[in-house]
Amino acid sequence: MSKPLLTVDTLSIAIGAEEPLTILRDIGFNLAPGETLGIVGESGSGKSLLSLALMGLLPEVAKATGTIRFEDQDLLTLEEDALCRLRGNRMGMIFQEPLTALNPSMTVGDQIAEGLVWHRGLSWKAARAEALKLLDRVRLPDAANKAKAFPHELSGGQRQRVGIAIAIALKPALLIADEPTTALDVTVQADVLDLMQELVKENRMALILISHDLGVIARMCARTLVLYAGRQMEEGATRDVLTTPLNPYTAGLIRALPRRREGSHRLQPIRGSVPGFRRLPPGCCFSDRCPDRIEACTMAEPDWRMLEAGRGSRCFLTGEKRP
């Protein structure tokens, strides 16, 4: 088994100074080179905050505890200069909304070239030539002219390709993609996902893919981590998680998926919504919405339980017969 490239251990993140509010609590997972991990959960579960923590981009009001170890360095103890040498170089990120992630005052070609100048010491001329190759690599039509364009002059799909080109320019060991296909039509989405698969295979990058779409996760990721209200609810091989979920929350996400069947099929949404972090129910954070709730669920938060290698769940009923 490969040595982990990334190890996250008991990661918790609190926001605020006077009355800090814990958003993420006791998150832990490993990721080896070439491995793919999907992170799923409803909006408000803490997925994007986790990705920002991994990149060292948390806001100043946030305090992280625990360990994020990347290539034998604890990212939570590094100074900003050291983090800057990793970001864009050994760690790349595709942001959820490329229009706001890209610099509106720079051409997209220069935004790709900037990292090559900063981290590789290339001249601007050489870096711009490399940027054109990267735009061709991400299959951006008419790359030579598009490189001279500003972000607002490109379509959403084209901007996302630019974001991918920036993220992969230095062939990072870890690529984090936060909802990379949001607001893209199905054809462009499929093309972007195909491209990401090719890049992971070619460069043996580790990939963390954050998505609401379980179909995308099933296609792209070997392992899946399920978050709810900042808690790690389930983790395991994607096939196992999606076919035999251990946690009622995971099962609820799967039941809510539209299915193509003969005859009518009524969706089964999870009742209610993700509570605010100051309004979590007592006991298990999912207890107020859980159809399998038992008395213990409202009394204490269940511990994380590992049933077998790589398979775990946070639920009193994990490994037990459901009522």
Image (cartoon, grey):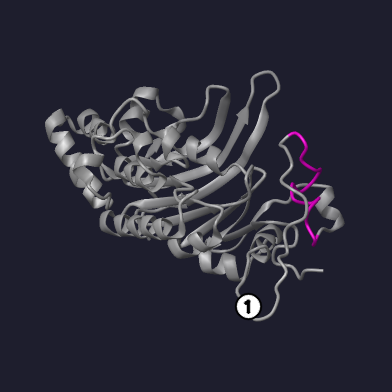
**Residue drawn 53% across and 41% down?**
48
Q: Is residue 264 left or right of residue 307?
A: right
The quarter of the displayed image where residue 7 is located:
top left
The quarter of the displayed image where residue 267 is located:
bottom right
287 w.r.t. 48: above or below:
below
96 w.r.t. 107: above or below:
below
Looking at the rendered structure, the kind of residue marked 1 is: Arg
Q: Secondary structure at mark 1?
A: loop
The stretch of residues the image draws in magenta is: 278-292
> Which residue occupies the extreme bottom position in the image?
262
Q: Residues within 10 Å of mark 1 (few under 14, many from 20)?
A: few
**Residue drawn 58% across and 65% down?**
241
Q: Is residue 303 left or right of residue 52?
A: right
Residue 225 locus on image (x, y percent): 55, 54
Q: Is residue 28 left or right of residue 139?
A: right
> Which residue occupies the extreme front position in the image?
153
Which residue position is annotated with label 1?
261
